[in-house]
Each structure stands twice: as C-alpha cells, then as structure tokens.
Image: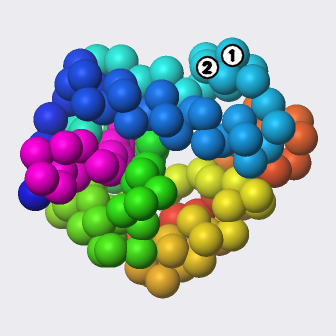
Amino acid sequence: MLLRTNSDNPDFAKLTGELDIELCRIYNTNPEDYEEYNRITNLPTVVLAYENNRAVGCGCFKIVDKKTIEIKRMFIQEYHRKTGIASRILAELETWAKELGYSEAILETGKGQPQAINFYQKYGYQITDNYNQFDDLGISVCLEKQF
C-alpha cells in the first residue's frame, strides 16, 4: 500500500534515518556531514510504502521551479528491495507531480550507488549536468526526466 503524506509522518523520519545510516556506510561519512542537505521539514509531498502495516520504503519531492520537482530521499529497506516497491513509489511521485502541473523531475544520487543510477535510467531518467554546487568530493550523479 502507498500513502501520500507529509514530512511530519514518524514513519518517514524512521526510514530516512535508516537511509542516512546506509549512505554513511557507502560513503564512509558521518550523518552530521550531510545533515544540512538531507533534512526534510514542512514538505507536503511524501510517499510511504507499507507491507503488512509496516513502513518499508519512502520518497518525496520538493518544488524547484514552475515546471520542475526534485525527487528526494528514496529508500527501500534492504529486505524489500527488488520487489517493485521503489518503482511504485517513483511512479506515485511522478503522478503526484504531474497532477500539480509539473513536467520535469531532477534528482541527485551518488557514484557509490550504481543500482540507483541504473534504476532511474530504467524509468527514463538521463544523466545530466551536476546541479549540486556542494559536491566537493565529486561523488554526485544528477539525472533528469521530462514527463
């Protein structure tokens, strides 16, 4: 089951906390290194996935400009990966954005996450110029898609 909700949902906070731990493991960093960039507050566009009444995945988007949204904080718990949950969350985020009148999505992931890059490319996202001015380590991969 998918639920449209907001960033105040405690299940979203729990899942994004798990995401932060995983990203720190992948990139050998500390949560506080990126806390400023990963903090999501007052966001009305969050999607949660539930299996057996338990939150197992999340994603959200924020508005960039009149036509563009940015996909953020996509995460599926390890045991639930490769089950189609991420595809359903991404499709729901895109549908929601289209309903609100947006026609383009951008996102940032990292070179240490080739599965994520492949996932987004499978759904029509194309690698584009890096829009993250804070990528001092050169690890970002940015993608975009027109709806």
**Residues at marks 2 and 1, CA–CA distance in whole angstroms:** 5 Å
Badge 2 vs badge 1, beta-carbon distance below 8 Å: yes
Report the span colored magenta. Answer: 47-62
Which three-letter amino acid code belongs to the residue tagged 2?
Glu
Residue at the image point whose x is 30% and y is 49% from the top? 56
Front position in the image: 138 or 50: 50
136 sits to left or right of 77: right
106 sits to left or right of 51: right
Label 2 sits on residue: 35
Label 1 sits on residue: 32
Which three-letter amino acid code belongs to the residue tagged 1?
Glu
Is 136 part of what is drawn in magenta?
A: no
Percent position of residue 122, x then y:
48, 83
Q: Which quadrant of the rendered structure holds the N terminus?
A: bottom left
Percent position of residue 96, x then y:
17, 54
Instruction: Please tell me whether residue 120 is drawn above or below residue 57 in the rendered image.
Output: below
In this picture the colour scheme is rainbow
Is 49 part of what is drawn in magenta?
A: yes
